[in-house]
Amino acid sequence: MERQGNALRLAAVSPEALAAGLLPGLALADARARLPLLAAFPHDPAADAALLRRLARLSGDFTPMVALEPPDALLLEIGGSAHLFGGAQKLAAALASRIEAEGLAQAHAFGDTPDAALAFACHPSAGGDWRRLPAAALGLAPEDEAALRRAGLRTLADIASRPRRALAARFGLPALTALDRIAGGVVRPLKPRKGRPSLMFEQRLPEPLLMADAVGLILERLAVRAARRLQRLGLGGRRFTAGLFRTDGLCQQLGVESGRATRDPAAITALFAERIAALADPLDPGFGYDRFTLAVGAAEPLAAAQPTLEGDAGSGPARDALIDRLSVRFGANRLLRLQPADRHLPEHAQHRVPAAGSRAMPWPLSPPAETPMRPLFLLDPPEPVEVLAEVPDGPPHRFRWRRQQHRIALAEGPERIVPEWWRSRSGRLDAGHTRDYWRVEDEGGRRFWLFRAGFYGADAPPRWFMHGLFA
Amino acid sequence: MQTESTPSGPAARPAGPAPAGRQRGSPAPEPPSPADPAEQGRLHELHAASAADAPSAAAAALLVAAASCPDRAIAWLRLQAAERRTGALYGPGLADLGLPPERLLMAVLPDELALLKAGTDLLKSRAFGAVLMELHGPCRRLDLTTSRRLALAAAAGNCLALLLRAEADPVPSSAWRRWQVASAPSRPLAALAPGAPAFAFELLRNRAGPSGARHALDWAQGRLVPRAPDAPRAPDMAETPDAPALPRTALPLPVGRSLPPGRRAA
């Protein structure tokens, strides 16, 4: 049942209910009046769509060209694949038995055009002859359908015998288009569910594989085949997707990405091993896997590399492969690289980017100096400190940070850093606090980076913050 | 650049306790200094003398690592909690210290086990010149077996392993050397400005010779250098005779409750 306006109406009925005379669209109250024991469930269109997508995946075994036809139909282009199954009828029988094994009812039909096939499947009484299809097959609005019936045009043969101009004038161009698509051989372009990846490798097993441990072996075999092919093409992949197909029709997809294009089977297998080890639910072979696929996505040109005599210790590829593996295991945001950012405020002067897939960017060289001018560690956000300092602009003498008192022995400053007013929304010069930074060293020899936000004599008294720790 | 540390010819052997055997007979081996490049393929421990010395110990570890492998990548592994305690590693500061940040790979890991596992993998990979593992506080997982595993991984990967510890008592381990690092008062620059970072090293344990040596080292242009003996530290600033004798007002400032200005400006 589903809610239409204020009434609960039936959205779909079971064969038994259909036999009892219930039809979709009937109000639930009327249906209950006829059948008091009626079991009604809320309509879940999302689940229906998911089921249809699953069936489409399953149909992908029979032809790569599968289009969804919501709410309840699939269109398969089998012109190129029927011979693999010994003819269209045998293909349809195999597919029908797969679908019925899922516990679903199905009806199928063949047609010269997608719409004809759809119409024949919906109206099996026509027996595959478009002339005997009822007028409802055109899918017109209910009042147009009633008008056709009143005019005595019950089948498509009747309608096609009328002058086209009159039909177009009375029912509009869509009616003629629908008629042409069913009867006139006009093929509507199908929108396939998903383009088949250009590089796809498949391994079918004679017996279902029950051991989850052996999955890695099969994937390695696929990776070796993929590597051979990629090498011939001079390509490397950055995204690999493994499909694990169970005998009971369930399919699990595992994806891994690598930072740079690769075709090294060992590296690809290692990435999948990490991915499988990091799964929240371990692999469940159920009754066994009988088919594996490996798709290569995001292929990039990759020239053959000459390994050095000392092996590739310390060189880029080995390091990148390791970073990929660790990123798959711990998460890409845990392995980081620091990249420079040309920004004014200290806390914005660097980006932390995931190391996998990013390049090391050269940092500007620091001029030789007697001592580092920027701290090794930056506290973000800065932590407030209590400071005893000379007013208005003198150095701090003492400060209290994290409940600890520090007496300052050496201090240098102030280094004034104005807020990035050009980035502020108001665009005003006083868009933030001006900061005066001090490099200080306490009596124990620890070095800190303090700053004062604001000025003495302004409306609000200035405040001091700890922003960084020096070596 | 590694020809210094890797012996060539038939004498080339995997890094192991071989130098110890050679030195057993010799009467007084040269006491090692952190200023010398550390041999690769070994595990070294650096203990911060106190929690406040952790940034200095980290910098010392970085400088030791950078000196031991001048052109190879360095990995730094730390825990999520350390990011809160000492703040995040700051690229401009690293560059100022003399270590180009592009050489560094950072890993911020959720727990000790992940850190030690990742550290072992990185050490073995031969793709890094040094791997720093930073662990604060007592760590139950870091026992003799684990440190032996790290030492073997370092030897297998010909990589310098540095275990950076803070707020923790030394526990038995198979580290080649164990240093204690504290930050030391620096030699002031003009106008009483803080000078180059200064460190006080103490050799707590040494497999290949006597321990107990103390070293005072200064930072100079990206390297650790022994401190020159004439280093009279300026007395307390308030007592310096050249401080202006003018009366100065000093105001205590309360800790504010509102957002820090960096956030406000954003």
Image (cartoon, helix red, strand yellow):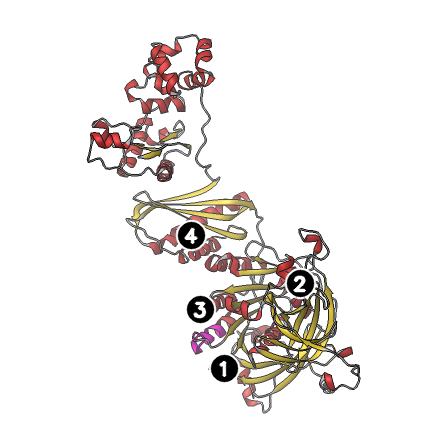
Q: Residue furthest bottom?
A: B27
What kind of residue is marked 1? Answer: Pro
Q: Name the residue carrying label 2.
A: A346
Same chain letter for marks 4 and 3: no
**Which one is closest to the eye, mark 4 or mark 1?**
1
Q: Chain of mark 2?
A: A
**Are the residues flagged by discs 2 and 4 in contact, CB closer than 8 Å?**
no
Q: Is residue B30 visible?
A: no
Q: Name the residue carrying label 1.
A: B170
Q: Name the residue carrying label 3.
A: B113
| Residue A150 on image: x %, y % | 34, 11
Give the vertical position of A398 relative to B104 (above or below).
below
Q: Chain of mark 3?
A: B
Q: CA distance from mark 3 to mark 1?
A: 19 Å
| Residue B8 on image: x %, y % | 60, 73
Q: Name the residue carrying label 4.
A: A220
**Which one is closest to the eye, mark 2 or mark 1?**
2
What kind of residue is marked 4? Answer: Glu
Same chain letter for marks 4 and 1: no
